[in-house]
Structure formats: structure tokens, C-alpha cells
Image: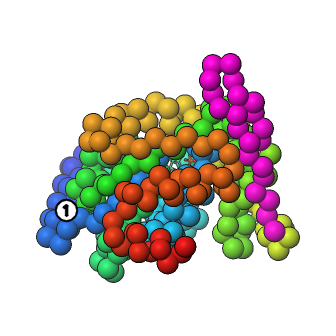
């Protein structure tokens, strides 16, 4: 079969599969979904993991799925590696495939409340997500731009237990143009994780700067998409986890359904 006709056949199969997924979900209701968006280094992973745990949501981080695929050494992972390590976004069709597979598998296993972290990042991804998920709220985390690079450079992951830490010790006074003071002490690893610390391959300064540029170029249409639907919630981070997490949970609590309220009351 000629290459172009193979590509169009694959594309048709993909569209058919998408339609089947969407209709099977429409029959039993699209799962309620909370989104976490924000630039690299803002703390999406840190806060969304804790928020998902607190309100009993299944946490799906697109970046983690991508890194798992790369680690698996699959052909798809190898295709992704080059793009990710250059600091670029994966093509919509590729990331959609990864997210959908994971989302549908969990949904088939009975999960009906999700938190998506790092997805969608383009307006096309946002539109595609609507076919499978009932997005309740898009939380858009913000942090002063000057801090983001330092936060990414300070990121460390324990190879053994998978926990995230940050060795950056950040203080930034309030700016003359009204930007808030930033006080972020490090989140140091405990001694047992110390020898297993690693940095992400894409957390080098040039790649972080590229990711920030790519993020800034793609983010506005996504923010506008959810703002138009009255679902965008902007949340500015100015401190470390101890003062920020309770403030974030307070803001989110009124938006949670009864299952979320119940999960939260069990944590209190
Ligand atoms: N929704 C997405 N669309 C396209 N590419 C994505 C998406 N989510 C993750 N990726 C790819 O995975 C990389 C790492 O994502 P993530 O861990 O969320 O990092 P960060 O937000 O710190 O840049 C991204 O730079 C991009 O290459």
C-alpha cells in the first residue's frame, strides 16, 4: 500500500476508534474531571497529586505517562523522546492517544472522577477532551516568571520511591509593579532518598527556557477556551506547600461534588 494511503487508512481507523470511545462514554456518562494547568516549574505535579488524594480523584499526569512510555523503550516512546528532550510539545494526535488509552482503561475499571495534570495544552486538545470528559473546572496555577526556571532546575526525583523534591531555596521581594513577594523554602529529600536522586532529562536551562516559550505560546487559547465556558479558576502561588496547599483546598472545596466532599471529610 502506498505510504499516503496507509497514513490516511490509519487516520480513519483512529477517527473511528475515537467515535466509538466517545459514544461508549456518552452512554454511561462522561466522567467528572478537574484540570490542572500552568507553566513548567509552577508545581502542577506537587499540587495536583495532593489535591487528587484529598478529594479522592484519580490523578493522571500527561508528563508522567510520556516519561513512562519513553522509559519503556517502545517505538512510540523513542519518537517522543526526541521531541520532549528538545522542549517541544508532542503532536496533539500522539498525546491524545496516550491520554485516552489511560483514561478509558481507568474508566472501564470503574473510575468516574479524574484530575488531569498537564493536559490539555492546546485548544485542539481541549476540544477533543470534551468528547470523553465532563470538565468541571480548569485550575490555572500561576507563579512569577522569574522563579520558574530556578524551580525546574531545583527539581529532583527519587528513582526508588518516585517522590518529587525541590532543592531550590527561593526568596524574591515584592516588585515595584505590584508582583507579590515569593518565599519558597526547599523541599529537601529525606536521607533514605538522597542517593537515589535524579533530574529529569528535560530540566536543563536551555530546554526549560524553550518549554516556557512553548507553554506561553500555547496557553492563552486554552485559558480562553475554559474562560468562555466559565470554568477557569486562576490561582497564584506565592509560597511553599505548607501555606499554599490549605489555601488551594479551601478555594476548591465549594466546587467539589458530594463524593469529593465526603473524601475530604475523611481526611480532616
Ligand atoms: N498535553 C500535552 N501536549 C503535548 N505534549 C505534552 C503534553 N503533556 C506533556 N507533554 C510532553 O511532555 C513533556 C513533559 O511534560 P510535563 O511533565 O507536564 O512538564 P512541564 O509542565 O514541566 O513542561 C512536555 O514538555 C511535552 O513534551
Q: Please say if 113 is above or below 231.
A: below
Q: Identify the residue at horizontal 38%, vertical 65% (top origin).
A: 114
Q: Identify the residue at horizontal 69%, vertical 73% (top origin).
A: 161
Write down the residue under mark 1: 22
Stretch in magenta = 170-190
Along the line of sight, the residue nearer the viewer: 123 or 83: 123
Quadrant occupied by the C terminus: bottom right
- Residue 176 falls in which quadrant of the image? top right
Is residue 134 something that shows in the picture?
yes
Q: Identify the residue at horizontal 64%, vertical 41% (top origin).
A: 238
Q: Position of residue 38 (x, y in %)?
A: 51, 43
Q: Please say if 75 is above or below 206.
A: below
Along the line of sight, the residue nearer the viewer: 37 or 129: 37
How many neighbours does mark 1 have within 10 angstroms: few (below 14), some (14-19), or many (20 or more)?
many
Q: Identify the residue at horizontal 43%, vertical 59% (top origin).
A: 253
Let me know if residue 27 is in the magenta part: no
From the image, give the main secondary structure of the stretch colored magenta: loop
Q: Residue furthest bottom?
A: 109
Along the line of sight, the residue nearer the viewer: 92 or 33: 33
Let me know if residue 186 is in the magenta part: yes
Q: Residue furthest top?
A: 176
Along the line of sight, the residue nearer the viewer: 140 or 183: 183
Amino acid at each position: 500500500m502506498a505510504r499516503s494511503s496507509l497514513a490516511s487508512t490509519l487516520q480513519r481507523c483512529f477517527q473511528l476508534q475515537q467515535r466509538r470511545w466517545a459514544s461508549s462514554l456518552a452512554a454511561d456518562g462522561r466522567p467528572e474531571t478537574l484540570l490542572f494547568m500552568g507553566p513548567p516549574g509552577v508545581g502542577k505535579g506537587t499540587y495536583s497529586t495532593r489535591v487528587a488524594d484529598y478529594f479522592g480523584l484519580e490523578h493522571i499526569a500527561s508528563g508522567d505517562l510520556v516519561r513512562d512510555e519513553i522509559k519503556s523503550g517502545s517505538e512510540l516512546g523513542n519518537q517522543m523522546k526526541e521531541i520532549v528532550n528538545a522542549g517541544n510539545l508532542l503532536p496533539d494526535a500522539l498525546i491524545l492517544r496516550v491520554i485516552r488509552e489511560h483514561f478509558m482503561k481507568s474508566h472501564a475499571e470503574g473510575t468516574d472522577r479524574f484530575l488531569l495534570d498537564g493536559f490539555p495544552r492546546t485548544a485542539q486538545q481541549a476540544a477533543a477532551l470534551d468528547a470523553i470528559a465532563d470538565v468541571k473546572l480548569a485550575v490555572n496555577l500561576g507563579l512569577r516568571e522569574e522563579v520558574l526556571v530556578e524551580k525546574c532546575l531545583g527539581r529532583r526525583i527519587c528513582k526508588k520511591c518516585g517522590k518529587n523534591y525541590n532543592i531550590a531555596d527561593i526568596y524574591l521581594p515584592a516588585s515595584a509593579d505590584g508582583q507579590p513577594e515569593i518565599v519558597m523554602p526547599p523541599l529537601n529529600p529525606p536521607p533514605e532518598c538522597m542517593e537515589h536522586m535524579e533530574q529529569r532529562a528535560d530540566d536543563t536551562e536551555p530546554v526549560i527556557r524553550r518549554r516556557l516559550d512553548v507553554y506561553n505560546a500555547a496557553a492563552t487559547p486554552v485559558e480562553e477556551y475554559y474562560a468562555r465556558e466559565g470554568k477557569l479558576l486562576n490561582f497564584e502561588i506565592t509560597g511553599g506547600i505548607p501555606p499554599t496547599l490549605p489555601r488551594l483546598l479551601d478555594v476548591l472545596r465549594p466546587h467539589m461534588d458530594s463524593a469529593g466532599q465526603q473524601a475530604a471529610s475523611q481526611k480532616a
